[in-house]
Image (cartoon, rainbow, N blue to C red):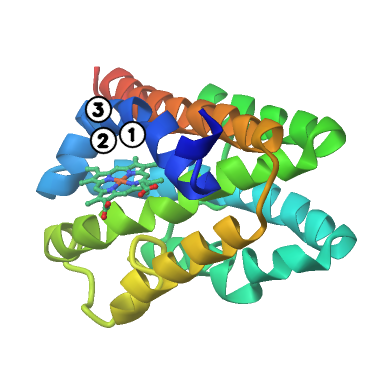
Amino acid sequence: MNAERSGAMLTLREGTATHHRRAEQHEFQRQFVRGTLPKLLYVRWLAQMLQIHAALESHLDRVVTRNPALRAVFDDGRRKVPGLRHDLAFLGGDAAGPVLPAAGALIARMDDLAAGRPMALLGVFYVLEGSTNGSKFIARKVRPAYALPTTGEGSAYLDPYGDMQPARWQEFKTAVDALALPPDQVDQLVAAAQATFDAIHDLGGELLAESTGAAA
Ligand code: HEM
C-alpha cells in the first residue's frame, strides 16, 4: 500500500476522483461551463466563494506562521480574496450577503480543522487551488456570456494566473509533495478534500434552488 503512495498529490487526486466528477457534472457547473449560467447566479456564487476563501486564508495565515515551510504551498500570490473582491466590485455584487448552508458548513468544518488538525486545511486548499485547472476554461465561456472584458475584470477569480496557470499548478503539486507528509496526515487531507468537493457540489444546488425559488 505504501509503495503506491508516491506522493500526497497522487493520493489526493485518486482519493477524490469520484468527488471531482460529481462536482464537475452538477447542473450548476454544466451551465457554468456552457456559459448559460445566469449572471446573477455567477455573482452570488462569487460572494459565497469569497466567504469560503476569506475563512480559509485567515486559517492558512496562522498555519504558515506556525510552520513557515508551508510558505512554499501558500504564499500571497495564491490568495483569492483580492480577486474575488475586485470581481464583485466590478459586477456590483454584494460581498457581505448571507452565507448559504453548504458554504457555512464548509466554513464550520475549517474552523474545526484549524482547532484540531490544522494541516488538513491543505486538503481544502488543494480542491480550491486545483479548481483553477477547470475554471480557466470556464472563464473563456463566462467572459463572452456576461460581456466581461478579456483583460480579466469580473473574471479574476476564475482565471487568477492567466498563462502561468499550468506552471503554478505544477509548482503547487511539487511543493505539497515536498512536504513529505506522513500517511495519516495525507488521509486527513483527503477527507477534508472530499468534504470540500461535496460542499462546492451542494453549494451549486443551493444557488440553483434559490434562483428557482426567486423566479417562482
Ligand atoms: C465544469 C466544471 C469543471 C471542469 C470542466 C473541470 C476540469 C478540470 C480539468 C481539465 C482538470 C485538469 C486535469 C488534469 O490536468 O489532470 C481539473 C483538475 C482539477 N479540478 Fe476540475 N473541473 C471542473 C470543476 C471543478 C470543481 C467544481 C472543482 C472543485 C470544487 C474542481 C477541482 C479540481 C481539482 C482539485 C483538480 C486537480 C486534480 C488533480 O489532483 O490533478 N474542478 N479539472
At label 1, counting other C-alpha atoms closer than 10 Å, the crowd grade (few under 14, some 14-19, many 20 or more) is many
Compare residues 54 and 184 and report the one nearer the observer.
184
Ligand 1: does it lie within 8 Å of the C-beta at label 2? yes
Q: Type of residue at label 1? A: His
Pointer 3: residues within 10 angstroms few (<14), some, or many (20+)? some
Q: Nearer the viewer, residue 60 or 176?
A: 176
Q: Secondary structure at mark 2?
A: helix
Q: Which mark is residue 24?
A: 2
Q: CA distance from mark 2 to mark 1?
A: 6 Å
User: In the rendered image, which residue does mark 1 sit on?
Assistant: 20
Instruction: Mark yes or no: residue 153 visible.
Output: no
**Residue drawn 37% across the image and 27% down it:** 19
Single out the mark in the foreground, 1 or 3.
Answer: 1
Label 1 lies in ligand 1 vicinity (Cβ under 8 Å)? yes
The residue identified by callout 3 is 26
Q: Position of residue 166 (x, y in %)?
A: 32, 70
Amino acid type shown at disc 2: Glu
Residue 68, percent across and down? 81, 68
Q: Along the line of sight, which residue is nearer the eye, 192 or 176?
A: 176
- The quadrant of the image that shows the C terminus is top left
The secondary element bearing badge 3 is classed as loop
